[in-house]
Each structure stands twice: as C-alpha cells, then as structure tokens.
Amino acid sequence: MQTRSLILIIIQLILGEEGKSYEIKDGKYYPLFPEFDKFNKGRWFYPVNESSLYTPLFGARARKEEMMGKMYDDINEKGLQHSYTPVMKRAPLLSSEENFGQQLQVLAKDNLIKMVIDKKELENYDSFVNQWKSQGGEELGKELNQWYEENK
C-alpha cells in the first residue's frame, strides 16, 4: 500500500470525511459539527508516533473551541523548531525486538527505578548492562545498527 493512501485511511479513521466531519483551512484541520462528534474516540486509532502526522490531525480536536485552538497553534508553532522523532520510531518491528523487546524494557525500567531510589544500585550498572546484552540486547543493538546503516 502506498504511503499516501495509508495516510488517507488514517485520516478517515481519526477525523472522518473531508467536507462532512472536518475541513481544511490554510493547511489546518477544523472540525465540522455535529458530524465531527461521531469521531470523539478517533484519538484511539492513532497508529503512529510520528509527530509530523499526529500533530496536524490532533489540531482538529484542539480547534473544537476557538481559544483552545489558538493556544494549540501557538504552542506548536513555537515548539516546532524543537520537535523530533527518535530514529527508532521509524524502524520496522525487528525480529530481535519482537523476541526480546518486552523483557529488555522491563529489565531496564526495573533497574532504572532501583538506581533512582538507591544510589548504591548505580554500582551495579555494569552488571545490568551485561545482563541486558546477554538477554537479547546485544542482538537487538546489532539489528538496529544494521537497519540504521541501510536506511540513513
């Protein structure tokens, strides 16, 4: 499926049909009532973490109230220069992520919490890194690096 058609499907899931439940003015999405209210749960269907797609679509929700829409646009305009999408969010689901990702995240979070609560746990940092690598982190790192080199 082409990227353009995928984006159109995402927009329909979230905002509905242009001219019926939303309109675009000056490149910004605005709700059309009462039809837009049928898509009140549309935010549940955001299938992306890509801010360049998410932010403009969410603007329709912010513009349900004029003042909130103005503040939303102002904040995003000022913050745009500081936004980024972490490169890993652009990677597809890699086999090592599928196999080890969840357990590695739990291991990392558990150890981080211990290190924040108890300074002495910082002495175990090297041990934690070795454990992370041995439980799939080494493989994940290699696979991510390979993907990155192929997709710079």
Image: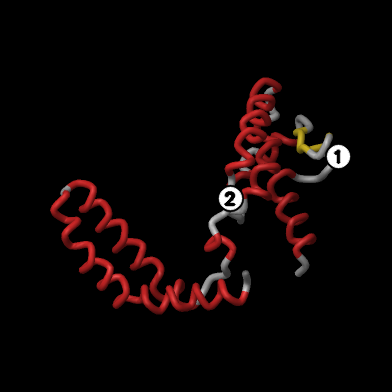
- Tag 1, which secondary structure? loop
Q: Residue at x 64, y 25 (%)?
A: 71
- Tag 2, which secondary structure? loop
Q: Amino acid at mark 2?
A: Tyr
Residue 19: mark in rendering: 1
Q: Residue at x 16, y 49 (%)?
A: 118
The percent coordinates of residue 126 (x first, y second) are: 23, 67
Q: Is residue 70 above or below residue 91?
A: above
| Quarter of the figure with the N terminus | bottom right
Task: Answer left or right for 11 relative to 107.
Answer: right
Cβ atoms at labels 2 and 1 below 8 Å apart: no
Task: Answer left or right for 134 relative to 50.
Answer: left
Residue of label 2: 84
The percent coordinates of residue 86 (x first, y second) are: 54, 56
Q: Is residue 42 above or below residue 149?
A: above
Instruction: Give neighbour class at mark 2: few <14, some 14-19, many 20+ (Cα, 10 Å).
Output: few
| Quarter of the figure with the C terminus | bottom right
Q: Amino acid at mark 1?
A: Gly
Q: Quadrant of residue 106?
A: bottom left
Q: Residue at x 70, y 42 (%)?
A: 56
Task: Answer left or right for 55 relative to 24.
Answer: left
Instruction: Give neighbour class at mark 1: few <14, some 14-19, many 20+ (Cα, 10 Å).
Output: few
Cα–Cα span, label 2 and label 1:
31 Å
- Of 57 and 27, the residue lying toward us: 27
Q: Is residue 10 above or below residue 38?
A: below
Residue lying furthest right = 19
Q: Earlier in the sequence, mark 2 or mark 1?
A: 1
- Of 40 and 140, the residue lying toward us: 140
